[in-house]
Image (spheres, grey):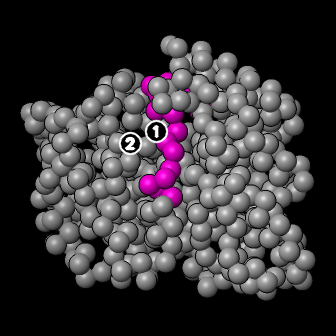
Amino acid sequence: MKTSTARAIQCSAALAAAGLLLTACGSSGGSGSTQAAPATAFKGRGPITYVAGKDTTGTVQTIIDRWNKAHPKEKVTFIQLPTDADSQRQQMIQNAETKSDAYTVLATDVVWTSEFAAHQWIEPLPAQQFPLSRMLQPVVQTGTYRGRLYAVPASSNGGLLFYRTDLLKKAGITKPPTTWAQMTADCAEVLKLPEAKNMSCYAGQFQKYEGLTVNFAEAVNSAGGRITDANGKPDVDTPQAKKGLDFLVTSFKDGTIPKEAITYQEEDGRQAFQSGKLVFLNNWPYVYSLAQKSAIEGKFAVAPLPGLNGPGASSLGGSDLALSSFAKNKATALDFMKFFTSEESATYFLKNASLAPPYADLYDNAALDKQYPYLPDLKQSITKAVPRPRVVQYGDVTAAIQNEVYAALTGKKSSAQALKDLQADLRKLTAQ
């Protein structure tokens, strides 16, 4: 995701354990746009599991421990999957196909809802029991399928441009770039500095996994193109999409993006930026809190992603919670989902892991904005983000995107040929 993997969650007084548990389990309110699931579907109390990608922030277990302390007979065991979204998806599907009850609550990527719901691997949820009306509506929509709620937003995500303020200032640059051309020009000035010796300009996530789909989609959307139209029909073999892919291909060729970035996932890019190897980085907001604890503390800031002719468009990311259709103790699971997706939990995750909250009012909180100056840019990134294709055959669609884009980035195909082949592949997949 970019993925939804390790982007989970200074605990404030408002998050005292008892208060958090009481308010979370008593959440109410909802959105009239989604239908309610029958309450009779949620029976049974006892131990459950929470399944998510590896927590590199070390915060998820803290929240689970609070639940377990208050619910000793309904304890949650944290099952950590690999960090990349493709592996997470594969293991969750394998569990569902065997109808195993080993997985209870699933932390799903926002693009999996249609696929998981269509295959009946996850349960429809009672929308009226969650405070959906207080959440950003584009985020809520990621959890719906055919008008019903199947997954509840735990966090959102929008791509941000991390940049070295100290080096830009020393190069005489007073503000971050808004276009790709400006970013390349700014970087050329920075790389003239002795302090920038052995640095590279820019990186995102370009290994052949979900992160590549995200970065490709951002490039296409930021150049005025799209992968599918409003009806879900492929529309990627266009001049606009080619300009987006050409930016990535050319950047690899001319060294704007370092060659090693073809192997980068989120954590690789974060570590390269923190260790002083990159001037600019496209990544999720979770990087902020970790970078503040590194050698570049106070030497970086964030801005919206640049685009072809102005600010670009992020892919919409984040993590939703879904309930396995084959799980036991679903009443406990539903209460835990209310707890984990509460506004109190979202505040905790924001403060401890820079995790983008789904709740709208947290972005308009003056105290939080002062403490986390990137929140306005993050809100803009999320509200203007473009969803990846919401299709039932998402696994096949993203694999096709990754194959063709990787071929272009590694020089095996031209941008034009890769897009032409991708258009044909997507037509076949979306026609099924």
Q: Disc 1 and disc 2: Cα gap in Å?
A: 7 Å
Task: Give the structural element (helix, strand or loop) at label 2.
Answer: loop
Residue 30 x, y percent position in the rendering: 18, 49
Q: How many marks?
A: 2
Residue 200 position (above or below residue 384): below
Q: In the image as oriented, which residue stretches furthest toward the left?
A: 40
Which amino acid, by three-letter code, is at mark 1?
A: Val
Sequence-first disc among 1 and 2: 1
195 sits left or right of 359 in the view = right
Q: Residue at x 16, y 36 (%)?
A: 36
Which picture quadrant has residue 87?
Answer: top right
Task: Give the structural element (helix, strand or loop) at label 1.
Answer: loop
**Is residue 79 at least partly visible in the picture?**
no
Q: Residue at x 23, y 78 (%)?
A: 14
193 sits left or right of 84 in the view = right
Which amino acid, by three-letter code, is at mark 2?
A: Thr
Residue 3 position (above or below residue 63): above
Category of crowding for the residue at label 2, using alpha-carbon neighbours closer than 10 angstroms: few (below 14), some (14–19), many (at least 20): many
Which picture quadrant has residue 359?
Answer: bottom left
Residue 111 x, y percent position in the rendering: 46, 39
Residue 391 covered by magenta stretch: yes
Category of crowding for the residue at label 1, using alpha-carbon neighbours closer than 10 angstroms: few (below 14), some (14–19), many (at least 20): many
380 sits left or right of 220 in the view = left
Residue 390 covered by magenta stretch: yes
CB atoms of marks 1 and 2 within 8 Å: yes
Residue 73 x, y percent position in the rendering: 15, 55
Residue in the foreground of this view, choosing between 119 and 43? 119
Q: Residue at x 36, y 82 (%)?
A: 367
Q: Which residue is mark 2?
A: 142
Q: Which residue is mark 1?
A: 111
Magenta extent:
381-399
